[in-house]
Structure formats: C-alpha cells, structure tokens
Image: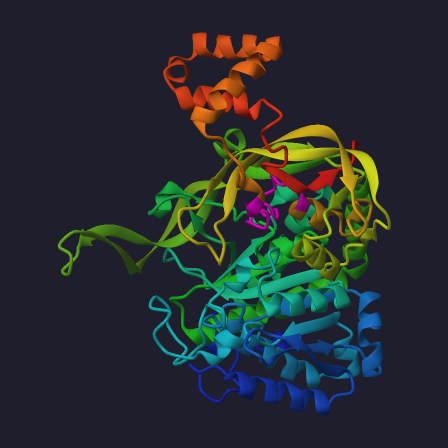
Amino acid sequence: MKIAHLILIPVLSLLFSFSVGAQNTTYTYDELIGQYAEIAQESKDIHFFNMGQSDFGEPIYLCVLGVAADSQMVFSYAQNSTVLLINNAIHAGEPCGVNASLDFVKHYSKLSENEKMKYPVIAVIPAYNVGGMHNRGAYSRANQIGPEEYGFRGNAQNLDLNRDFVKMDSENMKTFAHIFHALDPDVFLDTHTSNGADYQYTLTLIASLKARLNPVQAALIYDEMLPALKDSLWQKDSLDLFPYIEMNGKRLHEGIHAFNDKARYSMGYARLFHTLSFTSETHMLKDFEDRVVATYRLIEEMAKYTRRYDDEIERVRMIARNEMLQKRFYPVRYASDTALNNKSFIDLKGYAYKDSMSAITNSPRLFYDRNKDTTFTIPYDFYYRATDSTLIPEYFVVRSWEKETIERLKRNKVTVQIIDKDTNLLLRQNKVLYYQTVNSPYEGHYLHYDTKVQEAIDNVTLHQGDVLINTHQLSRLFILETLEPTSDDSYFNWGFYDSYLQQKEHFSAYVFEEIAQEILDNDMDLKREFEAKKAGDLDFANDRWAQLNYIYINSPYYEKSHKVLPVYKSLR
C-alpha cells in the first residue's frame, strides 16, 4: 500500500517502518548494494548500473526507475524524459537518505503500472561516498542521535566530497560527472543530516540561492514548487518543511541566512547546468526513524511534483539555458543584500533557550528547554546580490600543458577546439593583482578568495595543442565559473595555477644600482613617475629595495609572465 493512502497521523514514526528490520540501524555498503541488485533483477523497469570507480576502489552504482526498456536504452530514454536524481551518503555518517531511498525503491517496485505513472524517471545513487560507507563506527557524529552505526564524513582520501564538485580531486566526482551528464537531470536532491541549533523541525530544505537563478527558475522554485511541497507534506503528514537553518551568530535571535550554494557543493554544481537543485537536511537530534520517514516523504512528494509539472520544469530549464547563452555579463561573488534583508523576517518554531552554567567548564553554556515550544520572529537574510560582474568573452584559450583544467572541462561536456598550428592572436590576459588565501589547508588545497585581476590586451603566441573554448554552449555556466579567475570556485582560486604566482628571477641590489640609473636616464616617463612616488610616499622614499624593485618591475628585465594566468579571453 502506498504511504499516501495511509491514515494520516502526526507521529511520524507510526507512518512507516524500516525494511532494515530495526528502527535505529542503517545498511552496510554490501547489504545496500545487494538489495538494490536483487530488486533490479526482479523488475523490468528498474535498472542497476556500475557507473565507475570511487577512490576506495569499489564502484559507485546507480539505480534507475521508470524505464521499461533494454538497459542499453536507459540513458538515451532518460535524456529525453523528465528526471529526478537523488544522491545519498555524500556524508556517509548522515544515512537517512540511504534508508529512505531504498525503502522508496522497494515501494515503487510493488506499484501497479498506473500508480507508477505518477512518478517521473527517478535515478538514485544508493551511496556516493563508498569509502566513507566502509569506514563505519558509532562515535564520529557526536551531536547526532542514531543510527547505532554509520559511515564517516570523509572519503577514502579524507575529502569532503560535498566540496569537490568543481575541483574534482576524487575518482568519485569523475564518476558523478559521468552519471550527471548521462542523465541530464531536471531536478536534483542531495540528502543530509544537519548540525547546529535545536528547533522543532525534523526536515529542512535548501534551494538554490534565488539571486543566482534565472527569474523563471526562481519563480518556479520559490513561488510554486516549494509552497506545493510544504503544503502537501503538512496536509498529509503534519510534517513541517522549513528553510535550512544557517545561523547568523551563536543564538537564534540573531537570525538565519540563506545558504549560498557555491559550485563546489553538489547542488551548486547541478545549478550550473540549470537543474532545479535541492539539499535536504533532517535534524540531528530527532530520532533516526523520524529522519528517515521525513526524507522518504520528501522524496515521494518531490517525485510526484516533478512528474505532475514535468512540461513546466522542462520549459523553464530551456528558457534558462537559452537566456544564459544571450547574456553579456557574468555575475560573481554573491553577498547578503543588506538593504533588502533589513526588512526580512521569518517565524521559526524552536524551543525556549538560555545560558546556564556548565558543570564541566564553569562557564556559560547554551541550554534548550524542549518542554517549552516557542515561536520566534527572527531576521532572515534571504536576499543576496552579486558584488561584481565580468564581461563574458566569446571564447577562452587554455594552454595545452594545463591538462587538469582541460580534462575537467571535457568531463563536464565542454566542447574544446584544439589549435592545430602555432598562431598569434590579440587576446585579453589576466594578471593577478591581489588575492587572499586561507591559513590552513582546505580540502587538499590552499584556497584563494577576494581575487582581483588586471586585464590587458596582448599579442599572444598560441601553440599547437592549446585549446579554444567557445562560451556559446550549454556548459557555459560551468566554463565561466571555473575559468573566470574572480569566481568563487575558479580553478585559479582552487590553486590550479599557483606556480604562475611565483617570480622566478630577481636582482641583486648592488649589481642593479647602475642598471637602474641607466633605465631612468633613458625613460623620462618612468623617471617622473618614480620621483613622484618618492615625493608622495614616505615609506617608499626611505626603502632602497622598494625603490629599486619599482624600477625593476617597470623595466624589460622583469619577467612578463609573472602572475599572468595560462587562461586567456577573446577581446569580446
């Protein structure tokens, strides 16, 4: 019997029972894959595929529902259908989606043909973080209630795979890109369990930042889809769907803000291809069974919505794609829109809280009183805006030796044109003027941010094997996010081009003194600029090395390649 046909009662744990057999357990990886394989073997419209390797050395699998065709035709059918893609166990210690998805697949396999018509093509990654699934324990999630054992957040390389979707360091992500582009999903859901404040909600949901979306996509998600999901979950299960609670400070009264879905995250990556993207976050302090049921119900309602409005979803994606191809400027670096957010508030169902004295540290600690349901009206920083934009070039050029860049572009369906002979072109080159870097390694890199570049037109000698990337293609957003150095998740900011930041040749002051004098004697413009800087900058005037270096970097001796990136732009 379908869940939607059951008598509705507000106690979630009574709505559904685990097929695992125990209410506080989740599957091992081998158990999980075995059950999917068995279901697929017995169902003509459920298919199970080995899609490629993980860092752990075992495959990542994909289960596809709703395609009554030969296995060879599944992906071509999917690309011409409306598809919901569900990703589970990217953080293997948060397995509510693992259980919920398998239970949904079991439920689906028993439906009649007419009942299956209520659903779109659904593709499920049973467990993305294979290494994390194998690294089981009971203590890594100190703030989470259940299950009894679970996997680990990091993968085999100790990477957080939900930061890897642009840099693609893992084999997992290479396989994910293969899955994603084989399906071209219209709707994407990544299942998680939250950390953070305590509140009444079992289920919260992240949607793509409204400011990042095409207006027709934003209207569909925020004006139609989210209200419909919220209403159906409440009407059928008394299940409240609330925006993800990302706190502004350490206390709820300070407010919350919308999650900025950068391209490094799964849903931010999917957004680059105009997929309607969501992340579910069940609350860590709710019983595991309730978290599974809430995730199950979200999957069911999201799937039904996707099927019911499949033509509209397809139409909106097409509009977004076409309009993106016409844009002249690409917005970068989103920040809270203070003017709008000053007037934005939301009612949040929480618990009364206070500071009490810790018996351990003898200092104030936060205490939530779960016996006192309280509704707070708090600031909600929902509105964002781009703080800058850049002119979209007709094409980029990437040097042939930047193989990691080229490989990642190709894996994401970017068409590249290989230059077949040496040639000279007038191009815009990017010279890095300023950037900041995190103090400690972040996901295997020293991540840069607040990058600023100076563009200059130069006659660049291109070599056979360099690649030209036309921006007028469906992967345009991915191209811009990765190759535009000022974008949050550009390959420059992820450190792909750090070697270009290091100056390779310098000067010895005692040798360069006479050369510097000769340079000034022969360049009156430089001499005037140099004297003006000395007159207006006391620190400079008292720093012999800074003065010589100023002359050096404005002379033919200074290496022109210093801080110039190996990615060029067309003039327009």
Q: Which residues are magenta?
A: 483-499
The residue sitting at 57% across, 59% down in the picture is 164
Q: Is residue 531 visible?
A: yes
The residue sitting at 59% across, 45% down in the picture is 492
In this view, the residue in front, 477 or 82, is 477
Main SS, magenta region, reads: loop
Task: Tell me: residue 220, above or below residue 14.
Answer: above
Q: Quadrant of the C terminus?
A: top right
Q: How many marks?
A: 0
The residue sitting at 45% across, 61% down in the picture is 194
Q: Quadrant of residue 296?
A: bottom right
Task: Tell me: residue 363, above or below residue 331.
Answer: below
Q: Is residue 488 magenta?
A: yes
In this view, the residue in front, 456 or 327, is 456
Q: Is residue 68 visible?
A: no
The residue sitting at 59% across, 36% down in the picture is 562
Q: Position of residue 152 (x, y in %)?
A: 44, 72
> Taking 354 as reference, is 478 left or right?
right
In this view, the residue in front, 327 or 174, is 174
Q: How is the image coloured?
A: rainbow
Q: Position of residue 184 (x, y in %)?
A: 76, 63
Q: Position of residue 227 (x, y in %)?
A: 62, 53
Q: Position of residue 43 (x, y in %)?
A: 74, 88
> Taking 572 as reference, is 527 left or right?
left
Q: Is residue 528 magenta?
A: no
Q: Quadrant of the N terminus?
A: bottom right
Task: Tell me: residue 189, above or below residue 331.
Answer: below
